[in-house]
Amino acid sequence: MIRIIAFDADDTLWHNESLFVLSQEKFRNLLLAYQSPDWIDRKLFETEIRNLQHFGYGIKGFTLSMIETAVELSEGRISGREIGMLLDLCKEMLSAPVELLDGVASTIRALAKRHTLILITKGDLFDQESKLARSGLGDCFSHVDVVSEKTSATYQTVISRHGIQPNELLMVGNSMKSDVLPALAAGALAVHIPYHVTWAHEEATAPPESGYTKLEHISSLEQVVQSLEQSKAKSFQIRN
Amino acid sequence: MIRIIAFDADDTLWHNESLFVLSQEKFRNLLLAYQSPDWIDRKLFETEIRNLQHFGYGIKGFTLSMIETAVELSEGRISGREIGMLLDLCKEMLSAPVELLDGVASTIRALAKRHTLILITKGDLFDQESKLARSGLGDCFSHVDVVSEKTSATYQTVISRHGIQPNELLMVGNSMKSDVLPALAAGALAVHIPYHVTWAHEEATAPPESGYTKLEHISSLEQVVQSLEQSKAKSFQIRN
């Protein structure tokens, strides 16, 4: 049986990347006086990737990367007032309302009645805790793990800490690279629910050939969980 | 008996506040052209406290507060080049060598042989994990909790998650406000080992009248743990 259903948070339960896309648009407009839009986007992405080793994931690191890109692209000509606008953008992002994806609230509440749900999310601890609190779904999750990276070792730790078998964990998320592939590598089951935009860094080169379920929308998840349990029960009967 | 010994990390196991003090000195020197040293310090502290609700604790939030203060104090006249220096300072802080306090390595290794040690630290998840990895002490701790705040509820959660009695937890840390008072309020034992400098925000107005042990240096900790266990065994004998 599926003992634990683990969910990614950003872009699986609530909108997140769209917030970054909007902020990046404002950033681009601010720097248009200095460089072309494509060049601004490319430089910002390069800076973000280079800074991952220092900053990890999250809005504060993104803001520091925006400021660094602004200083570099403007060759130091960026003004204090413009830097102040980037700081305001950071605080706007941090306090933006948590917008649940369509169908999330009802699906999570229904699943929480019969399953143990946990949250496994990357990013900034402070920011993620604040978003979960504001989402109104905090009570549905028996455990929240904010992790610095999602590797197969991350999922193995979850599995062994909860004392379950790998295939008793189902991971649900929008990122092939962080949610699906490493969970499958750890022996867990996985459901992939793509978000309409994906940050380039989260794109995986190739999806696995099988072993996971792809959904258009979270509202089909309850049904998928039931089918997975039935097919597991069936294979158990056959084996025994 | 003491079942779990929990340690704070920054300024308990390794130097941290001294790094902030050094960076703040560089920040002050950078802004001397715009304002007086006292005014710079006061404004930075005010900005940090105001931003705690947005940024939480840690170097990235500190840097964003430095940048905000620089823009405000210079009335927008701060240059891109100077902002770039603050970003460099941020990365220097994030990659600064982890300097263990005197006596920490031997004390932790000795205690780890006979006790379950855990780490309970505030701050930035990514940064704290990186520091623990670089400290060389990662193997001594069976669990690491990076938390956004240290309240008595935080310690209660630790106690119930480990299935122990409150007075089977001993908390060791340098902050009266975050390590000692809330741990005592949760019914745990506490050892206070002050660091030579304390960030104003971590200062507690009044220490408790009793119930905790104050140490000058971590090297006496093993002995204190033994005495605490003996006195608990004694009170157990008397009661029974």
Image: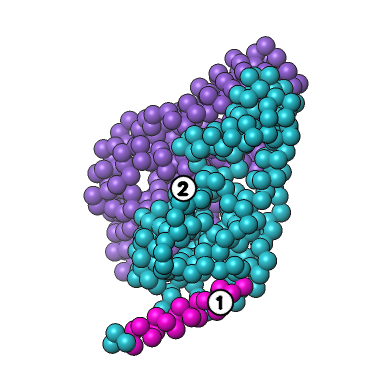
Chain colours: A cyan, B purple
Mark 2 near mark 1, Cβ–Cβ under 8 Å? no
Percent position (x, y) of residue A224? 52, 76
Magenta stretch bounds: A219-237
Task: Answer left or right for B112 relative to A89.
Answer: left
Point out the residue furthest to the top here.
Answer: B33
Q: Is residue A74 visible?
A: yes
Residue A41 sits in which quadrant?
Answer: top right
> In the image, is residue A107 part of the stretch drawn in magenta?
no
Task: Answer left or right for A69 relative to B215.
Answer: right
Percent position (x, y) of residue A18? 66, 51
Q: Residues within 10 Å of mark 1 (few under 14, many from 20)?
A: some
| Secondary element type, mark 2 | loop
**Mark 2, residue position:** A148
| Secondary element type, mark 1 | helix
Q: Nearer the viewer, mark 2 or mark 1?
A: 1
> In the image, is residue A228 part of the stretch drawn in magenta?
yes
Report the front residue among A5 and A193.
A193
Q: Which mark is residue A222?
A: 1
Q: Is residue A127 above or below residue A61?
A: below
Amino acid tagged 1: Glu
Amino acid tagged 2: Ser
